[in-house]
Image: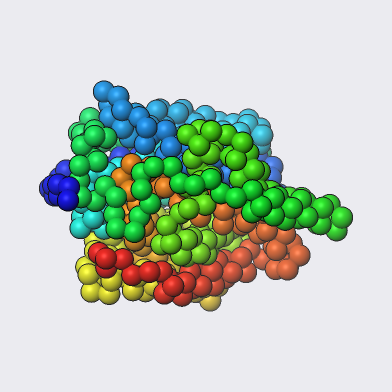
Amino acid sequence: MGNRKPSLSFWQIWNMCFGFLGIQFGFALQNANVSRIFQTLGADMEQVPGLWIAAPLTGLLVQPVIGYFSDRTWTRLGRRRPYFLWGALFSTAALVVMPTSPELWIAAGTLWVLDASLNVSMEPFRAFVGDQLAPRQRPTGYAMQSFFIGVGSVVASALPFVLAKVGVANTAGPGEVPDTVRYAFWFGGAVLLLAVLWTVVRTREYPPEVLRTFDDATPEGALPAADAPVPPAGGGLAWLLVGVAGLVAVAALDLDRMLYVLAGLPLGYGLLRLVARRLAPQRMLATIAADLHAMPTTMRQLAVVQFFSWFGLFAMWIYTTAAVAQTHYGSSDPQSAAYNDGANWVGVLFAAYNGFAALAAIVIPWLARRLGLRGAHLVNLLLGALGLLSIAFVDDPRWLLGSMVGVGFAWASILSLPYALLSDSLPAEKMGVYMGIFNFFIVIPQLVAVSTLGFLLGRVFDGEPMRVLMLGGASLAIAGLCVLRVSRPRSA
C-alpha cells in the first residue's frame, strides 16, 4: 500500500482552480461573440458552423498532445503549470487581435490561435486536480472549477451588454465590430492572464516520483503506467475504409461540403491506428493510439454521455444568437440595431446560465452525496434539456432567464461530474494523456455539429435556428439517459 494523499484546505483548492476563472473568461467571450463577429464580417448564417470548426478541431489535436507532454514534464515551474502559463500568454494575444480583424479570414484564423491556446492551458488544469487531490476531494475540486467557470462566464458574457448600458457604441459601420465587443475582448485578455498567473504563483505540484508513492497512483482496475498494447491493424483499416466511403458518398451525392469533416473523422482515426503500428511503442502517436484503444471501461461509457452533452451545447452556442434575434427581436440583419440588441441579450442569457452554474457548483457536491455521481448528473442533464427546449415556447425574451436555470445546472454538471467519475479509474502517471483523450469525446460531437447543423438548418429546419436549439435540448435528454449505463464508481 502506498501513502494516502494529504487533504488540501479550502483555500489551497481555491488557488489551484482560480486560473479557470481566466480561461473561461476567454471561452465565454468566444462562445457569446464569435458568431456575431463572423456575421459582422460578412459570413452567411449557414457558413457560421464551418467557421467554428477551429474550436473542436484544435481541441482534438492539442489536448492529447499537451496531456502526453505534460505527463512527462518536470521543470522549476512544475509539471502542469508551464502549460497554464504559455497557453495564457498566447490566448491573451489572440483576444486582443480578434475584434480588430479587418477580414473574415483573419478572424477565422485568430479563432484557431485562440482556441488552441485556451486548450493548452485548460487540459493540464483537469489533470492538475487529479494530481493534487485524493479521490475523496476530486468532486470538490472539479466543482470548484465549475464555480470559477460560472463566475468568469457571467462577467465575460454580460460585458458587451454592460458596456452598451454605460454608453459604449454597440453598432459600427459595415464590416466593423462594435466597440462593446472590442473592449470586452481586451479586458478579458487581461483577466485571463492575471488569473492564470495567480494559480502559477500560488500553487505547488508533487514531483512524479512522489506521485507514484500515493495509494491512488494506480487505482484498482485501472491500466498500469506501462504502455498499453498496440491496437491491431485490422481495425485501423476498417475505420479508414469507412472514412473513404463517406468522402466518396459526399462527393457523389453532391452533399454539403461540411460533411467532408464528418467523413474525415473515421478516416483520421484509421490513419492514426495504422501509422501508430509502424512507430516505436514509446513514440507519442503510438502511445496515444494504444491508450485510446485500451481506455478504461468507464471512459468508454462516459464517451456516449459526453457526445450527446456537447452536441447539445454546441448547437446552443452556435445558434442562440441567431434564434433569439430572429424570433424575439425580429431581425436577421447583423447591421441592424434590433439584431445587436438581441445579440447583447444573448450575452446576458449566457451570463445568466453561467451564474446559475456557479450556484449549481455549490449544490452539486451535496447532490452527488445524496444521489451519487451518476444520479446527480442525470438530474442535471434533464434540467438542461428542459431549459433549452423551453426557449422555443417563451414569448417574452426576459423570461428566457428562467430557461437558463436548467441550462446552468447542466453546464456545471458537465464540467465536473464526468471528470469525477473518470478520474478514479486513471493511473496517476497517465492522468494528463487520458484527460486529453477524454477530450476527444467533447470535440468529436462538436465536429459532428459543425459538419451537420448548417446542412440540417438549410435542408431540414427551413432556415429556422430555433429548431436547432430544440435538437440540442433533445440531445441533452439523451445524454442524461445514457448516464444510467455508466459503471458505479467506488466513490459514488
Scheme of colours in the image = rainbow
Question: Does residue 315 appear anywhere in the picture?
Answer: yes
Q: Nearer the viewer, residue 48 or 1?
A: 1
Question: Does residue 163 appear anywhere in the picture?
Answer: no
Q: Residue at x 53, y 33 (%)?
A: 280
Question: Image height check: is 196 above or below 427?
Answer: above
457 with respect to 66 (left or right): right
117 with respect to 450 (left or right): left
Q: Residue at x 38, y 51 (%)?
A: 223
Q: Quadrant of residue 369?
A: bottom left
Q: Residue at x 61, y 45 (%)?
A: 273
- Position of the C terminus, as image quadrant, is bottom left
> Where residue 482 sits in the image (x, y, percent)?
47, 72
Q: Residue at x 23, y 74 (%)?
A: 370
> Where residue 190 sits in the image (x, y, percent)?
36, 32
Q: Nearer the viewer, residue 162 or 247?
A: 247
